[in-house]
Amino acid sequence: MDYYSNQISRLIEELSRLPGIGAKSAARLAFHLIHMPAEEVKRLAEVMVEARENVKYCSQCCTLTDQEICPICRNESRDHKTIMVVENTRDLAAYEKTGKYNGVYHVLHGAISPMLGIGPGDIKLKELIERLEGDVDEVIVATNSSLEGETTAMYISKLIKPIGTKVSRIASGVPVGGDLEYIDEVTLLRALEGRTEL
Ligand code: ZN
């Protein structure tokens, strides 16, 4: 890549580290950035740095937020006794978009995967169990229907059953291997309504 200037090469290299960005896309983005008004590029860079610095885990549900407690956990009109467990913040957003779920969430930030070496200690499970010391009626496990999601659901069920809290699993209206974030609202709601006790 030495036919580019050193700075362009560096920009392309950094961009190509991002997920889903191959060498070609990285080059396209790099040239796009260079042709953008300097002010816009500056704003983009600032927003990225600020988000990285300020966004952290909600102290209750572990979702990503720039506040100590996220807006959902702070909302007193929501049902804090029903906790939906999702793999990531994008899945939370998918259920939020339906506007029909009034409970709160717990975001695991991953799923158990022996193949990838991700164990129970690598996701936010301990935090979930700690929440059950409070007043909780039901834990709805809404992990993806992939092998990892199912493994995680089984693990959670085994972990929670002895505590005595009701655990349910969303119905498999969600296609096998399907990521929640790509599924339409009707299917999401059907999966929620058709949940079964684990
Ligand atoms: Zn929260």
Image (spheres, rainbow, N blue to C red):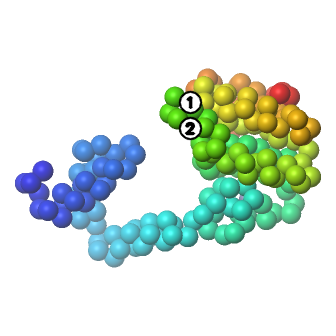
Q: Give the residue pinned by disc 2.
A: 118
Q: Is residue 117 visible?
A: yes
Q: Position of residue 21 (x, y in %)?
A: 34, 45
Q: Position of residue 194 (x, y in %)?
A: 81, 28
Q: Amino acid at mark 2?
A: Ile
| Label 2 Cα crowd, 10 Å radius (few <14 / some 14-19 / many 20+) | some
User: Disc 2 to disc 1, how far (Cα)?
Assistant: 6 Å
- Foreground of the two, 12 or 77: 12
Q: Classify 10 Å Cα crowding around label 1: few (below 14), some (14-19), many (20 and above).
A: few
Q: Secondary structure at mark 2?
A: loop
Choose between 97 and 153: the one closer to the eye.
153
Question: Is 25 situated left or right of 166 in this image?
Answer: left
For mark 1, what is the residue? 114
Tell which of 168 and 186 is nearer to you.
168
Which residue: 72% across, 62% down?
Answer: 59
Helix, strand or loop status at disc 1: loop
Residue with the most extreme bottom position: 39
Q: Splitting the image into 4 quarters, where does residue 113 fall?
A: top right
Cβ of mark 1 under 8 Å from ligand 1: the answer is no
Q: Can residue 192 be seen at all in this image of the molecule?
A: no
Q: Is 182 placed left or right of 4 in the picture?
A: right
Decide: marks 2, 1 in contact (CB < 8 A)?
Answer: yes
Q: Which residue is depicted at the point 87% across and 60% down? A: 77
